[in-house]
Image (cartoon, rainbow, N blue to C red):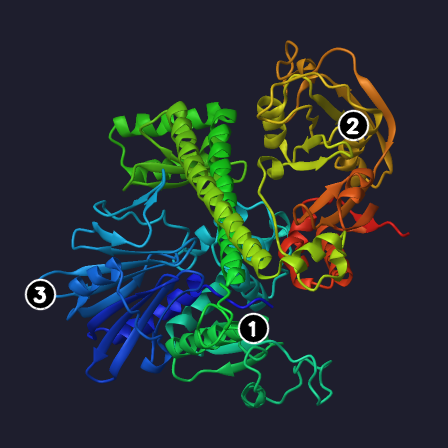
Amino acid sequence: MDRKHELTSVDLTALVGELNGFVGAKVDKAYLYPGKLLRLKCRDFDRGRLELLIEVGEDKRAHISPPEHVPDAPERPPDFAKMLRNRLSGADFAGVSQQGFDRVLTFSFERDDENTEIVAELFGQGNIAALDETGTVVDCLDTVRLQSRTVAPGAVYEYPDARFHPFEASAEDFAARMADSDTDLVRTLATQLNFGGLYAEELCTRAGVEKTLDIEAAGEEDFDALYRATDRLVDALEGSLEPRLYYERDTDDSDGDDEDDGTDRASEADADAETDESADDNGEEGRDAPVDVTPLPLEEYDELRSKPIEDGFNAALDAYFTAIEGAEAAESGGEGGGSGGSSGRPDFESEIEKQKRIIAQQEGAIEDFEQQAQAEREKAESLYSHYDLVDDILSTVGAAREADFGWEEIEARFAEGEEKGIPAAESVHDLDPATGTITIELDGERIDLETGMGVERNADRLYTEAKRIGEKKQGAQEAIENTRENLTEAKQRRGEWEAEDDPEEGRAEEEEGETDWLAEPSIPVRMNEQWYERFRWFRTSEGFLVLGGRNADQNEDLVKKYMDRGDRFLHTQIEGGPVTVLKATGPSEPAREIDFSAATLAEAAQFAVSYSTVWKNGRYAGDVYMVDPDQVSKTPESGEYVEKGAFVIRGDRTYFDDTPVGAAVGISCEPETRVLGGPPAAIEPRVETSIALEPGRYAQNDAAKTLYREFRERFRDTSFVRKIASPDKIAEFLPAGGSRIVED
C-alpha cells in the first residue's frame, strides 16, 4: 500500500476546525525551505511556542507541529521568506478557511498597519501566494498563467474554479449529480462528487451499496443511502474527531492469526490496545512507518493495524509526516530528514516519483475537463434535438412575463399542464425567480435555461461553456507537457550520475540483454498520454493505428475529425458496432494512400467485430465490411433520418465474412508501461505477458478484476500492476458483454 503524501478535501474539512482553535497566536518569523515547505514560527499565550507548517511540494500538508519536529532554519532566507517576515512579524493569526471543497486553504493574518492572506494550493504542482488586503498577489512561489486563471505578483488572485461540494448539496442535487454519470457508483463518488478514491469506497461501505454497481442499474434507494452516509460523515467531521494512524498488516506475525482479519475481537477497545502494542514494539523505522492518517476511523481500513491519536488531528498529521519523513530517508539511505545518503547522491527517486504523481493528478484534471465539456455539449445538442419542445417552454414563459404573470403563477400553470400530460410542462423541473432561469429535463439530463433567450442563444451559451472548459483542458495539457519534461530531465540526471559513478556497471547492464520484467522487483512507470486514448484503440502488427468509437459521440468525432483520405472505415454488417477507422497516417502527417496488407486488414476487422454486439450476444464470428472515407456520409436519402453516431454508406463494399472474434489484454513494460488490448495477433508481440479472451458469462467489471488478479500473480512487482493496470484500466480494453479467459 502506497503511503499518503497529500491531504484530501475531507482531511482539510476536518483540519480547518482544529486550526481555528489557534486564532490569536502571534507570528514571530517565517522560513522557507527547499521543497516548498513554509514554516511560520508563532507563540501562543496559553500554549507557548507553535510551529505552523505548510508544504506544497512532494508532500502537501498543513498542520501545527511542536518545535522539536521542525527542521533547522536555513542559513539564508530567500526573498519570499523575507517578504513574509516584513508582512507577518507581530501579526495575529485570524483564522483559516477551505475554499469550497477544494484543496485550497486561506490563512488570514491581521496587523495594525496591514493585513495579509496566505493561500496554500495543496493540489497539482502546489503553490503558495501572499495576498494584500485587496486580494492582490504580493508574491508567490510559482507564477501561473493559464487561460483559466492567473497567479502572478501584481495580479488579483484567482481561485481555481469551484468544484461540486457534496457536503452542501441537497438530496436532490446529490442524486442528480450521481445520475448524470456514466460509470459505476464508486468512481462517480470519486470523480463527479470529488470524494477521491478512499472516501468514495468508504461511503459505499458505510451505505451498504455495491461499489461497482453501474449508475444505470442504481436506484433512488442507492443514492439515498449514499447521501445519508455522507450526512453521517459530515456530522462526524463536525463532532469530536477520532484521528488514526494506519499501518500495513504484518504478514509474518508469530501468533498464527494471519488468516483471521481480527473480526472476532471482543471490542474495539481490545483492537486498539492490540494495534498500539504492535505498532510500538516494532523497532524498524521504515518497516513500521504508517501508510495513512485519517480524522476518523475508516471501515475500509478495518484490516490494517491502527493507532488512535488522542491529541487531535493536528497531532496525528504531525506524527504521520514526521514518521514517513524519517522512514523514507532511511529507505533511501539518507540520514534524518536529508535528501541523500553519505555519498552525497541526490535523491533522484523522490524527484521522479514527485513528477509522476503530478502527472497523474494532471491527467485526472484533463479527464475531468473532458467530461465536463462533453456534458455541456450534450446539453446543447439536446436543446436542438428537442427544439420545438424547448421553444414552446421558453415562449410560454416569455409570453407570461410580458402579460405580467408572477413566477408563482407561471409555476402553477406548468404544474397544471403536467397533470394534464402536456409534454412541455412535464419537462419543466424547476423555476428560479431570483435568476430568471428555468430547469428542464431532457433525456434524463437537467438543463438550466435563461428565459430571456431563445433556443439558439441558450445552446450557444452551453457551447461557449464547453469551449471555456476545453481551454482549461488545453492549459492543463500544456502544464502536463512541462511536467513530463521535468520528469525526463530528472531521469537523465539520474542516468548521468549513475554512469559517472560506475561506468563499468552501466556497460554491464547494457550487455545483459533483454530484461525479465516479470521477475523485476521494481519496474519504473513510463507513460505518455496520447491524443487517441479516449477512443478504443490498438496498433496492428505492422504499426498502423486503429480507432473505435465508445459511443455515438465518438463515432461522430472519428468520422468528422479524424478520418482522412487513405484511411479505411470498417463496421459490422449488423447494427450495434463501433465505427472503426484504420489510420493510414498520423495527425501531423499529410494524408496519403496506403496499400494495407491482408494481416493488417484482418486485425482491423477482428477489432471491429469483437467490440460490437456480436461479442455481446455471445457469438464467435460476424461479417464486417470496409469502405473508403468518401463513401461515408451523414446526408440521408430523401425522407430518411440518420441517427447520431450512424452514417450512410454509398458505393461498393469490401466484405470480411465470418470474421472470428478475439481479444487479448496485456501489459507492456517497454518502451512504455501501459495496458494494451485488441486482437491477439497484434497485442501479444508488444507486451510482456497477455491473457486471451472469448465471449463468456463474466461481466466486464468482473472479468477485469479477474485479469488484474492474474497479472498480479505474474509480476513480482505487484505495486507496478496496481499503478498501471488497475481493474478500471483493464476494463477499458474489454469488449462489452460477458467474457472468459481462453484456456491454454
Residue highlighted by disc 1 = 331
Callout 2 environment at 10 Å: few (<14), some (14 to 19), or many (20+)? few
**Residue 224 appears anywhere in the view:** no
Locate residue 460, reporting x and y percent: 40, 27
Q: Amino acid type of disc 1?
A: Glu
Identity of the residue drawn at 64% across and 9% down: 638
Locate residue 453, reporting x and y percent: 34, 27
C-alpha separation, residue under disc 1 versus residue under disc 3: 48 Å
Residue highlighted by disc 2 = 574
Say which label, 1 or 2, has the lower sequence index.
1
Locate residue 313, reporting x and y percent: 40, 76
C-alpha separation, residue under disc 1 versus residue under disc 2: 58 Å
C-alpha separation, residue under disc 2 versus residue under disc 3: 77 Å
**Mark 2 vs 3: CB contact within 8 A:** no
**Mark 1 vs 2: CB contact within 8 A:** no
For the residues carrying marks 1 and 2, which lies nearer the camera in this image? 1
Q: Amino acid type of disc 3?
A: Asp
In the image shown, does 603 or 584 lie closer to the viewer? Answer: 584
Residue highlighted by disc 3 = 112
Query: In terms of secondary structure, where does tag 1 sit?
Result: helix
Say which label, 2 or 3, has the lower sequence index.
3
For the residues carrying marks 1 and 3, which lies nearer the camera in this image? 1
For the residues carrying marks 2 and 3, which lies nearer the camera in this image? 3
Residue that sits furthest to the left in the current view: 113
Identity of the residue drawn at 43% across and 78% down: 316
**Mark 1 vs 3: CB contact within 8 A:** no
Query: In terms of secondary structure, where does tag 3 sit?
Result: loop
Question: Relative to residue 395, is residue 354 depicted above or below?
Answer: below
Say which label, 1 or 3, has the lower sequence index.
3
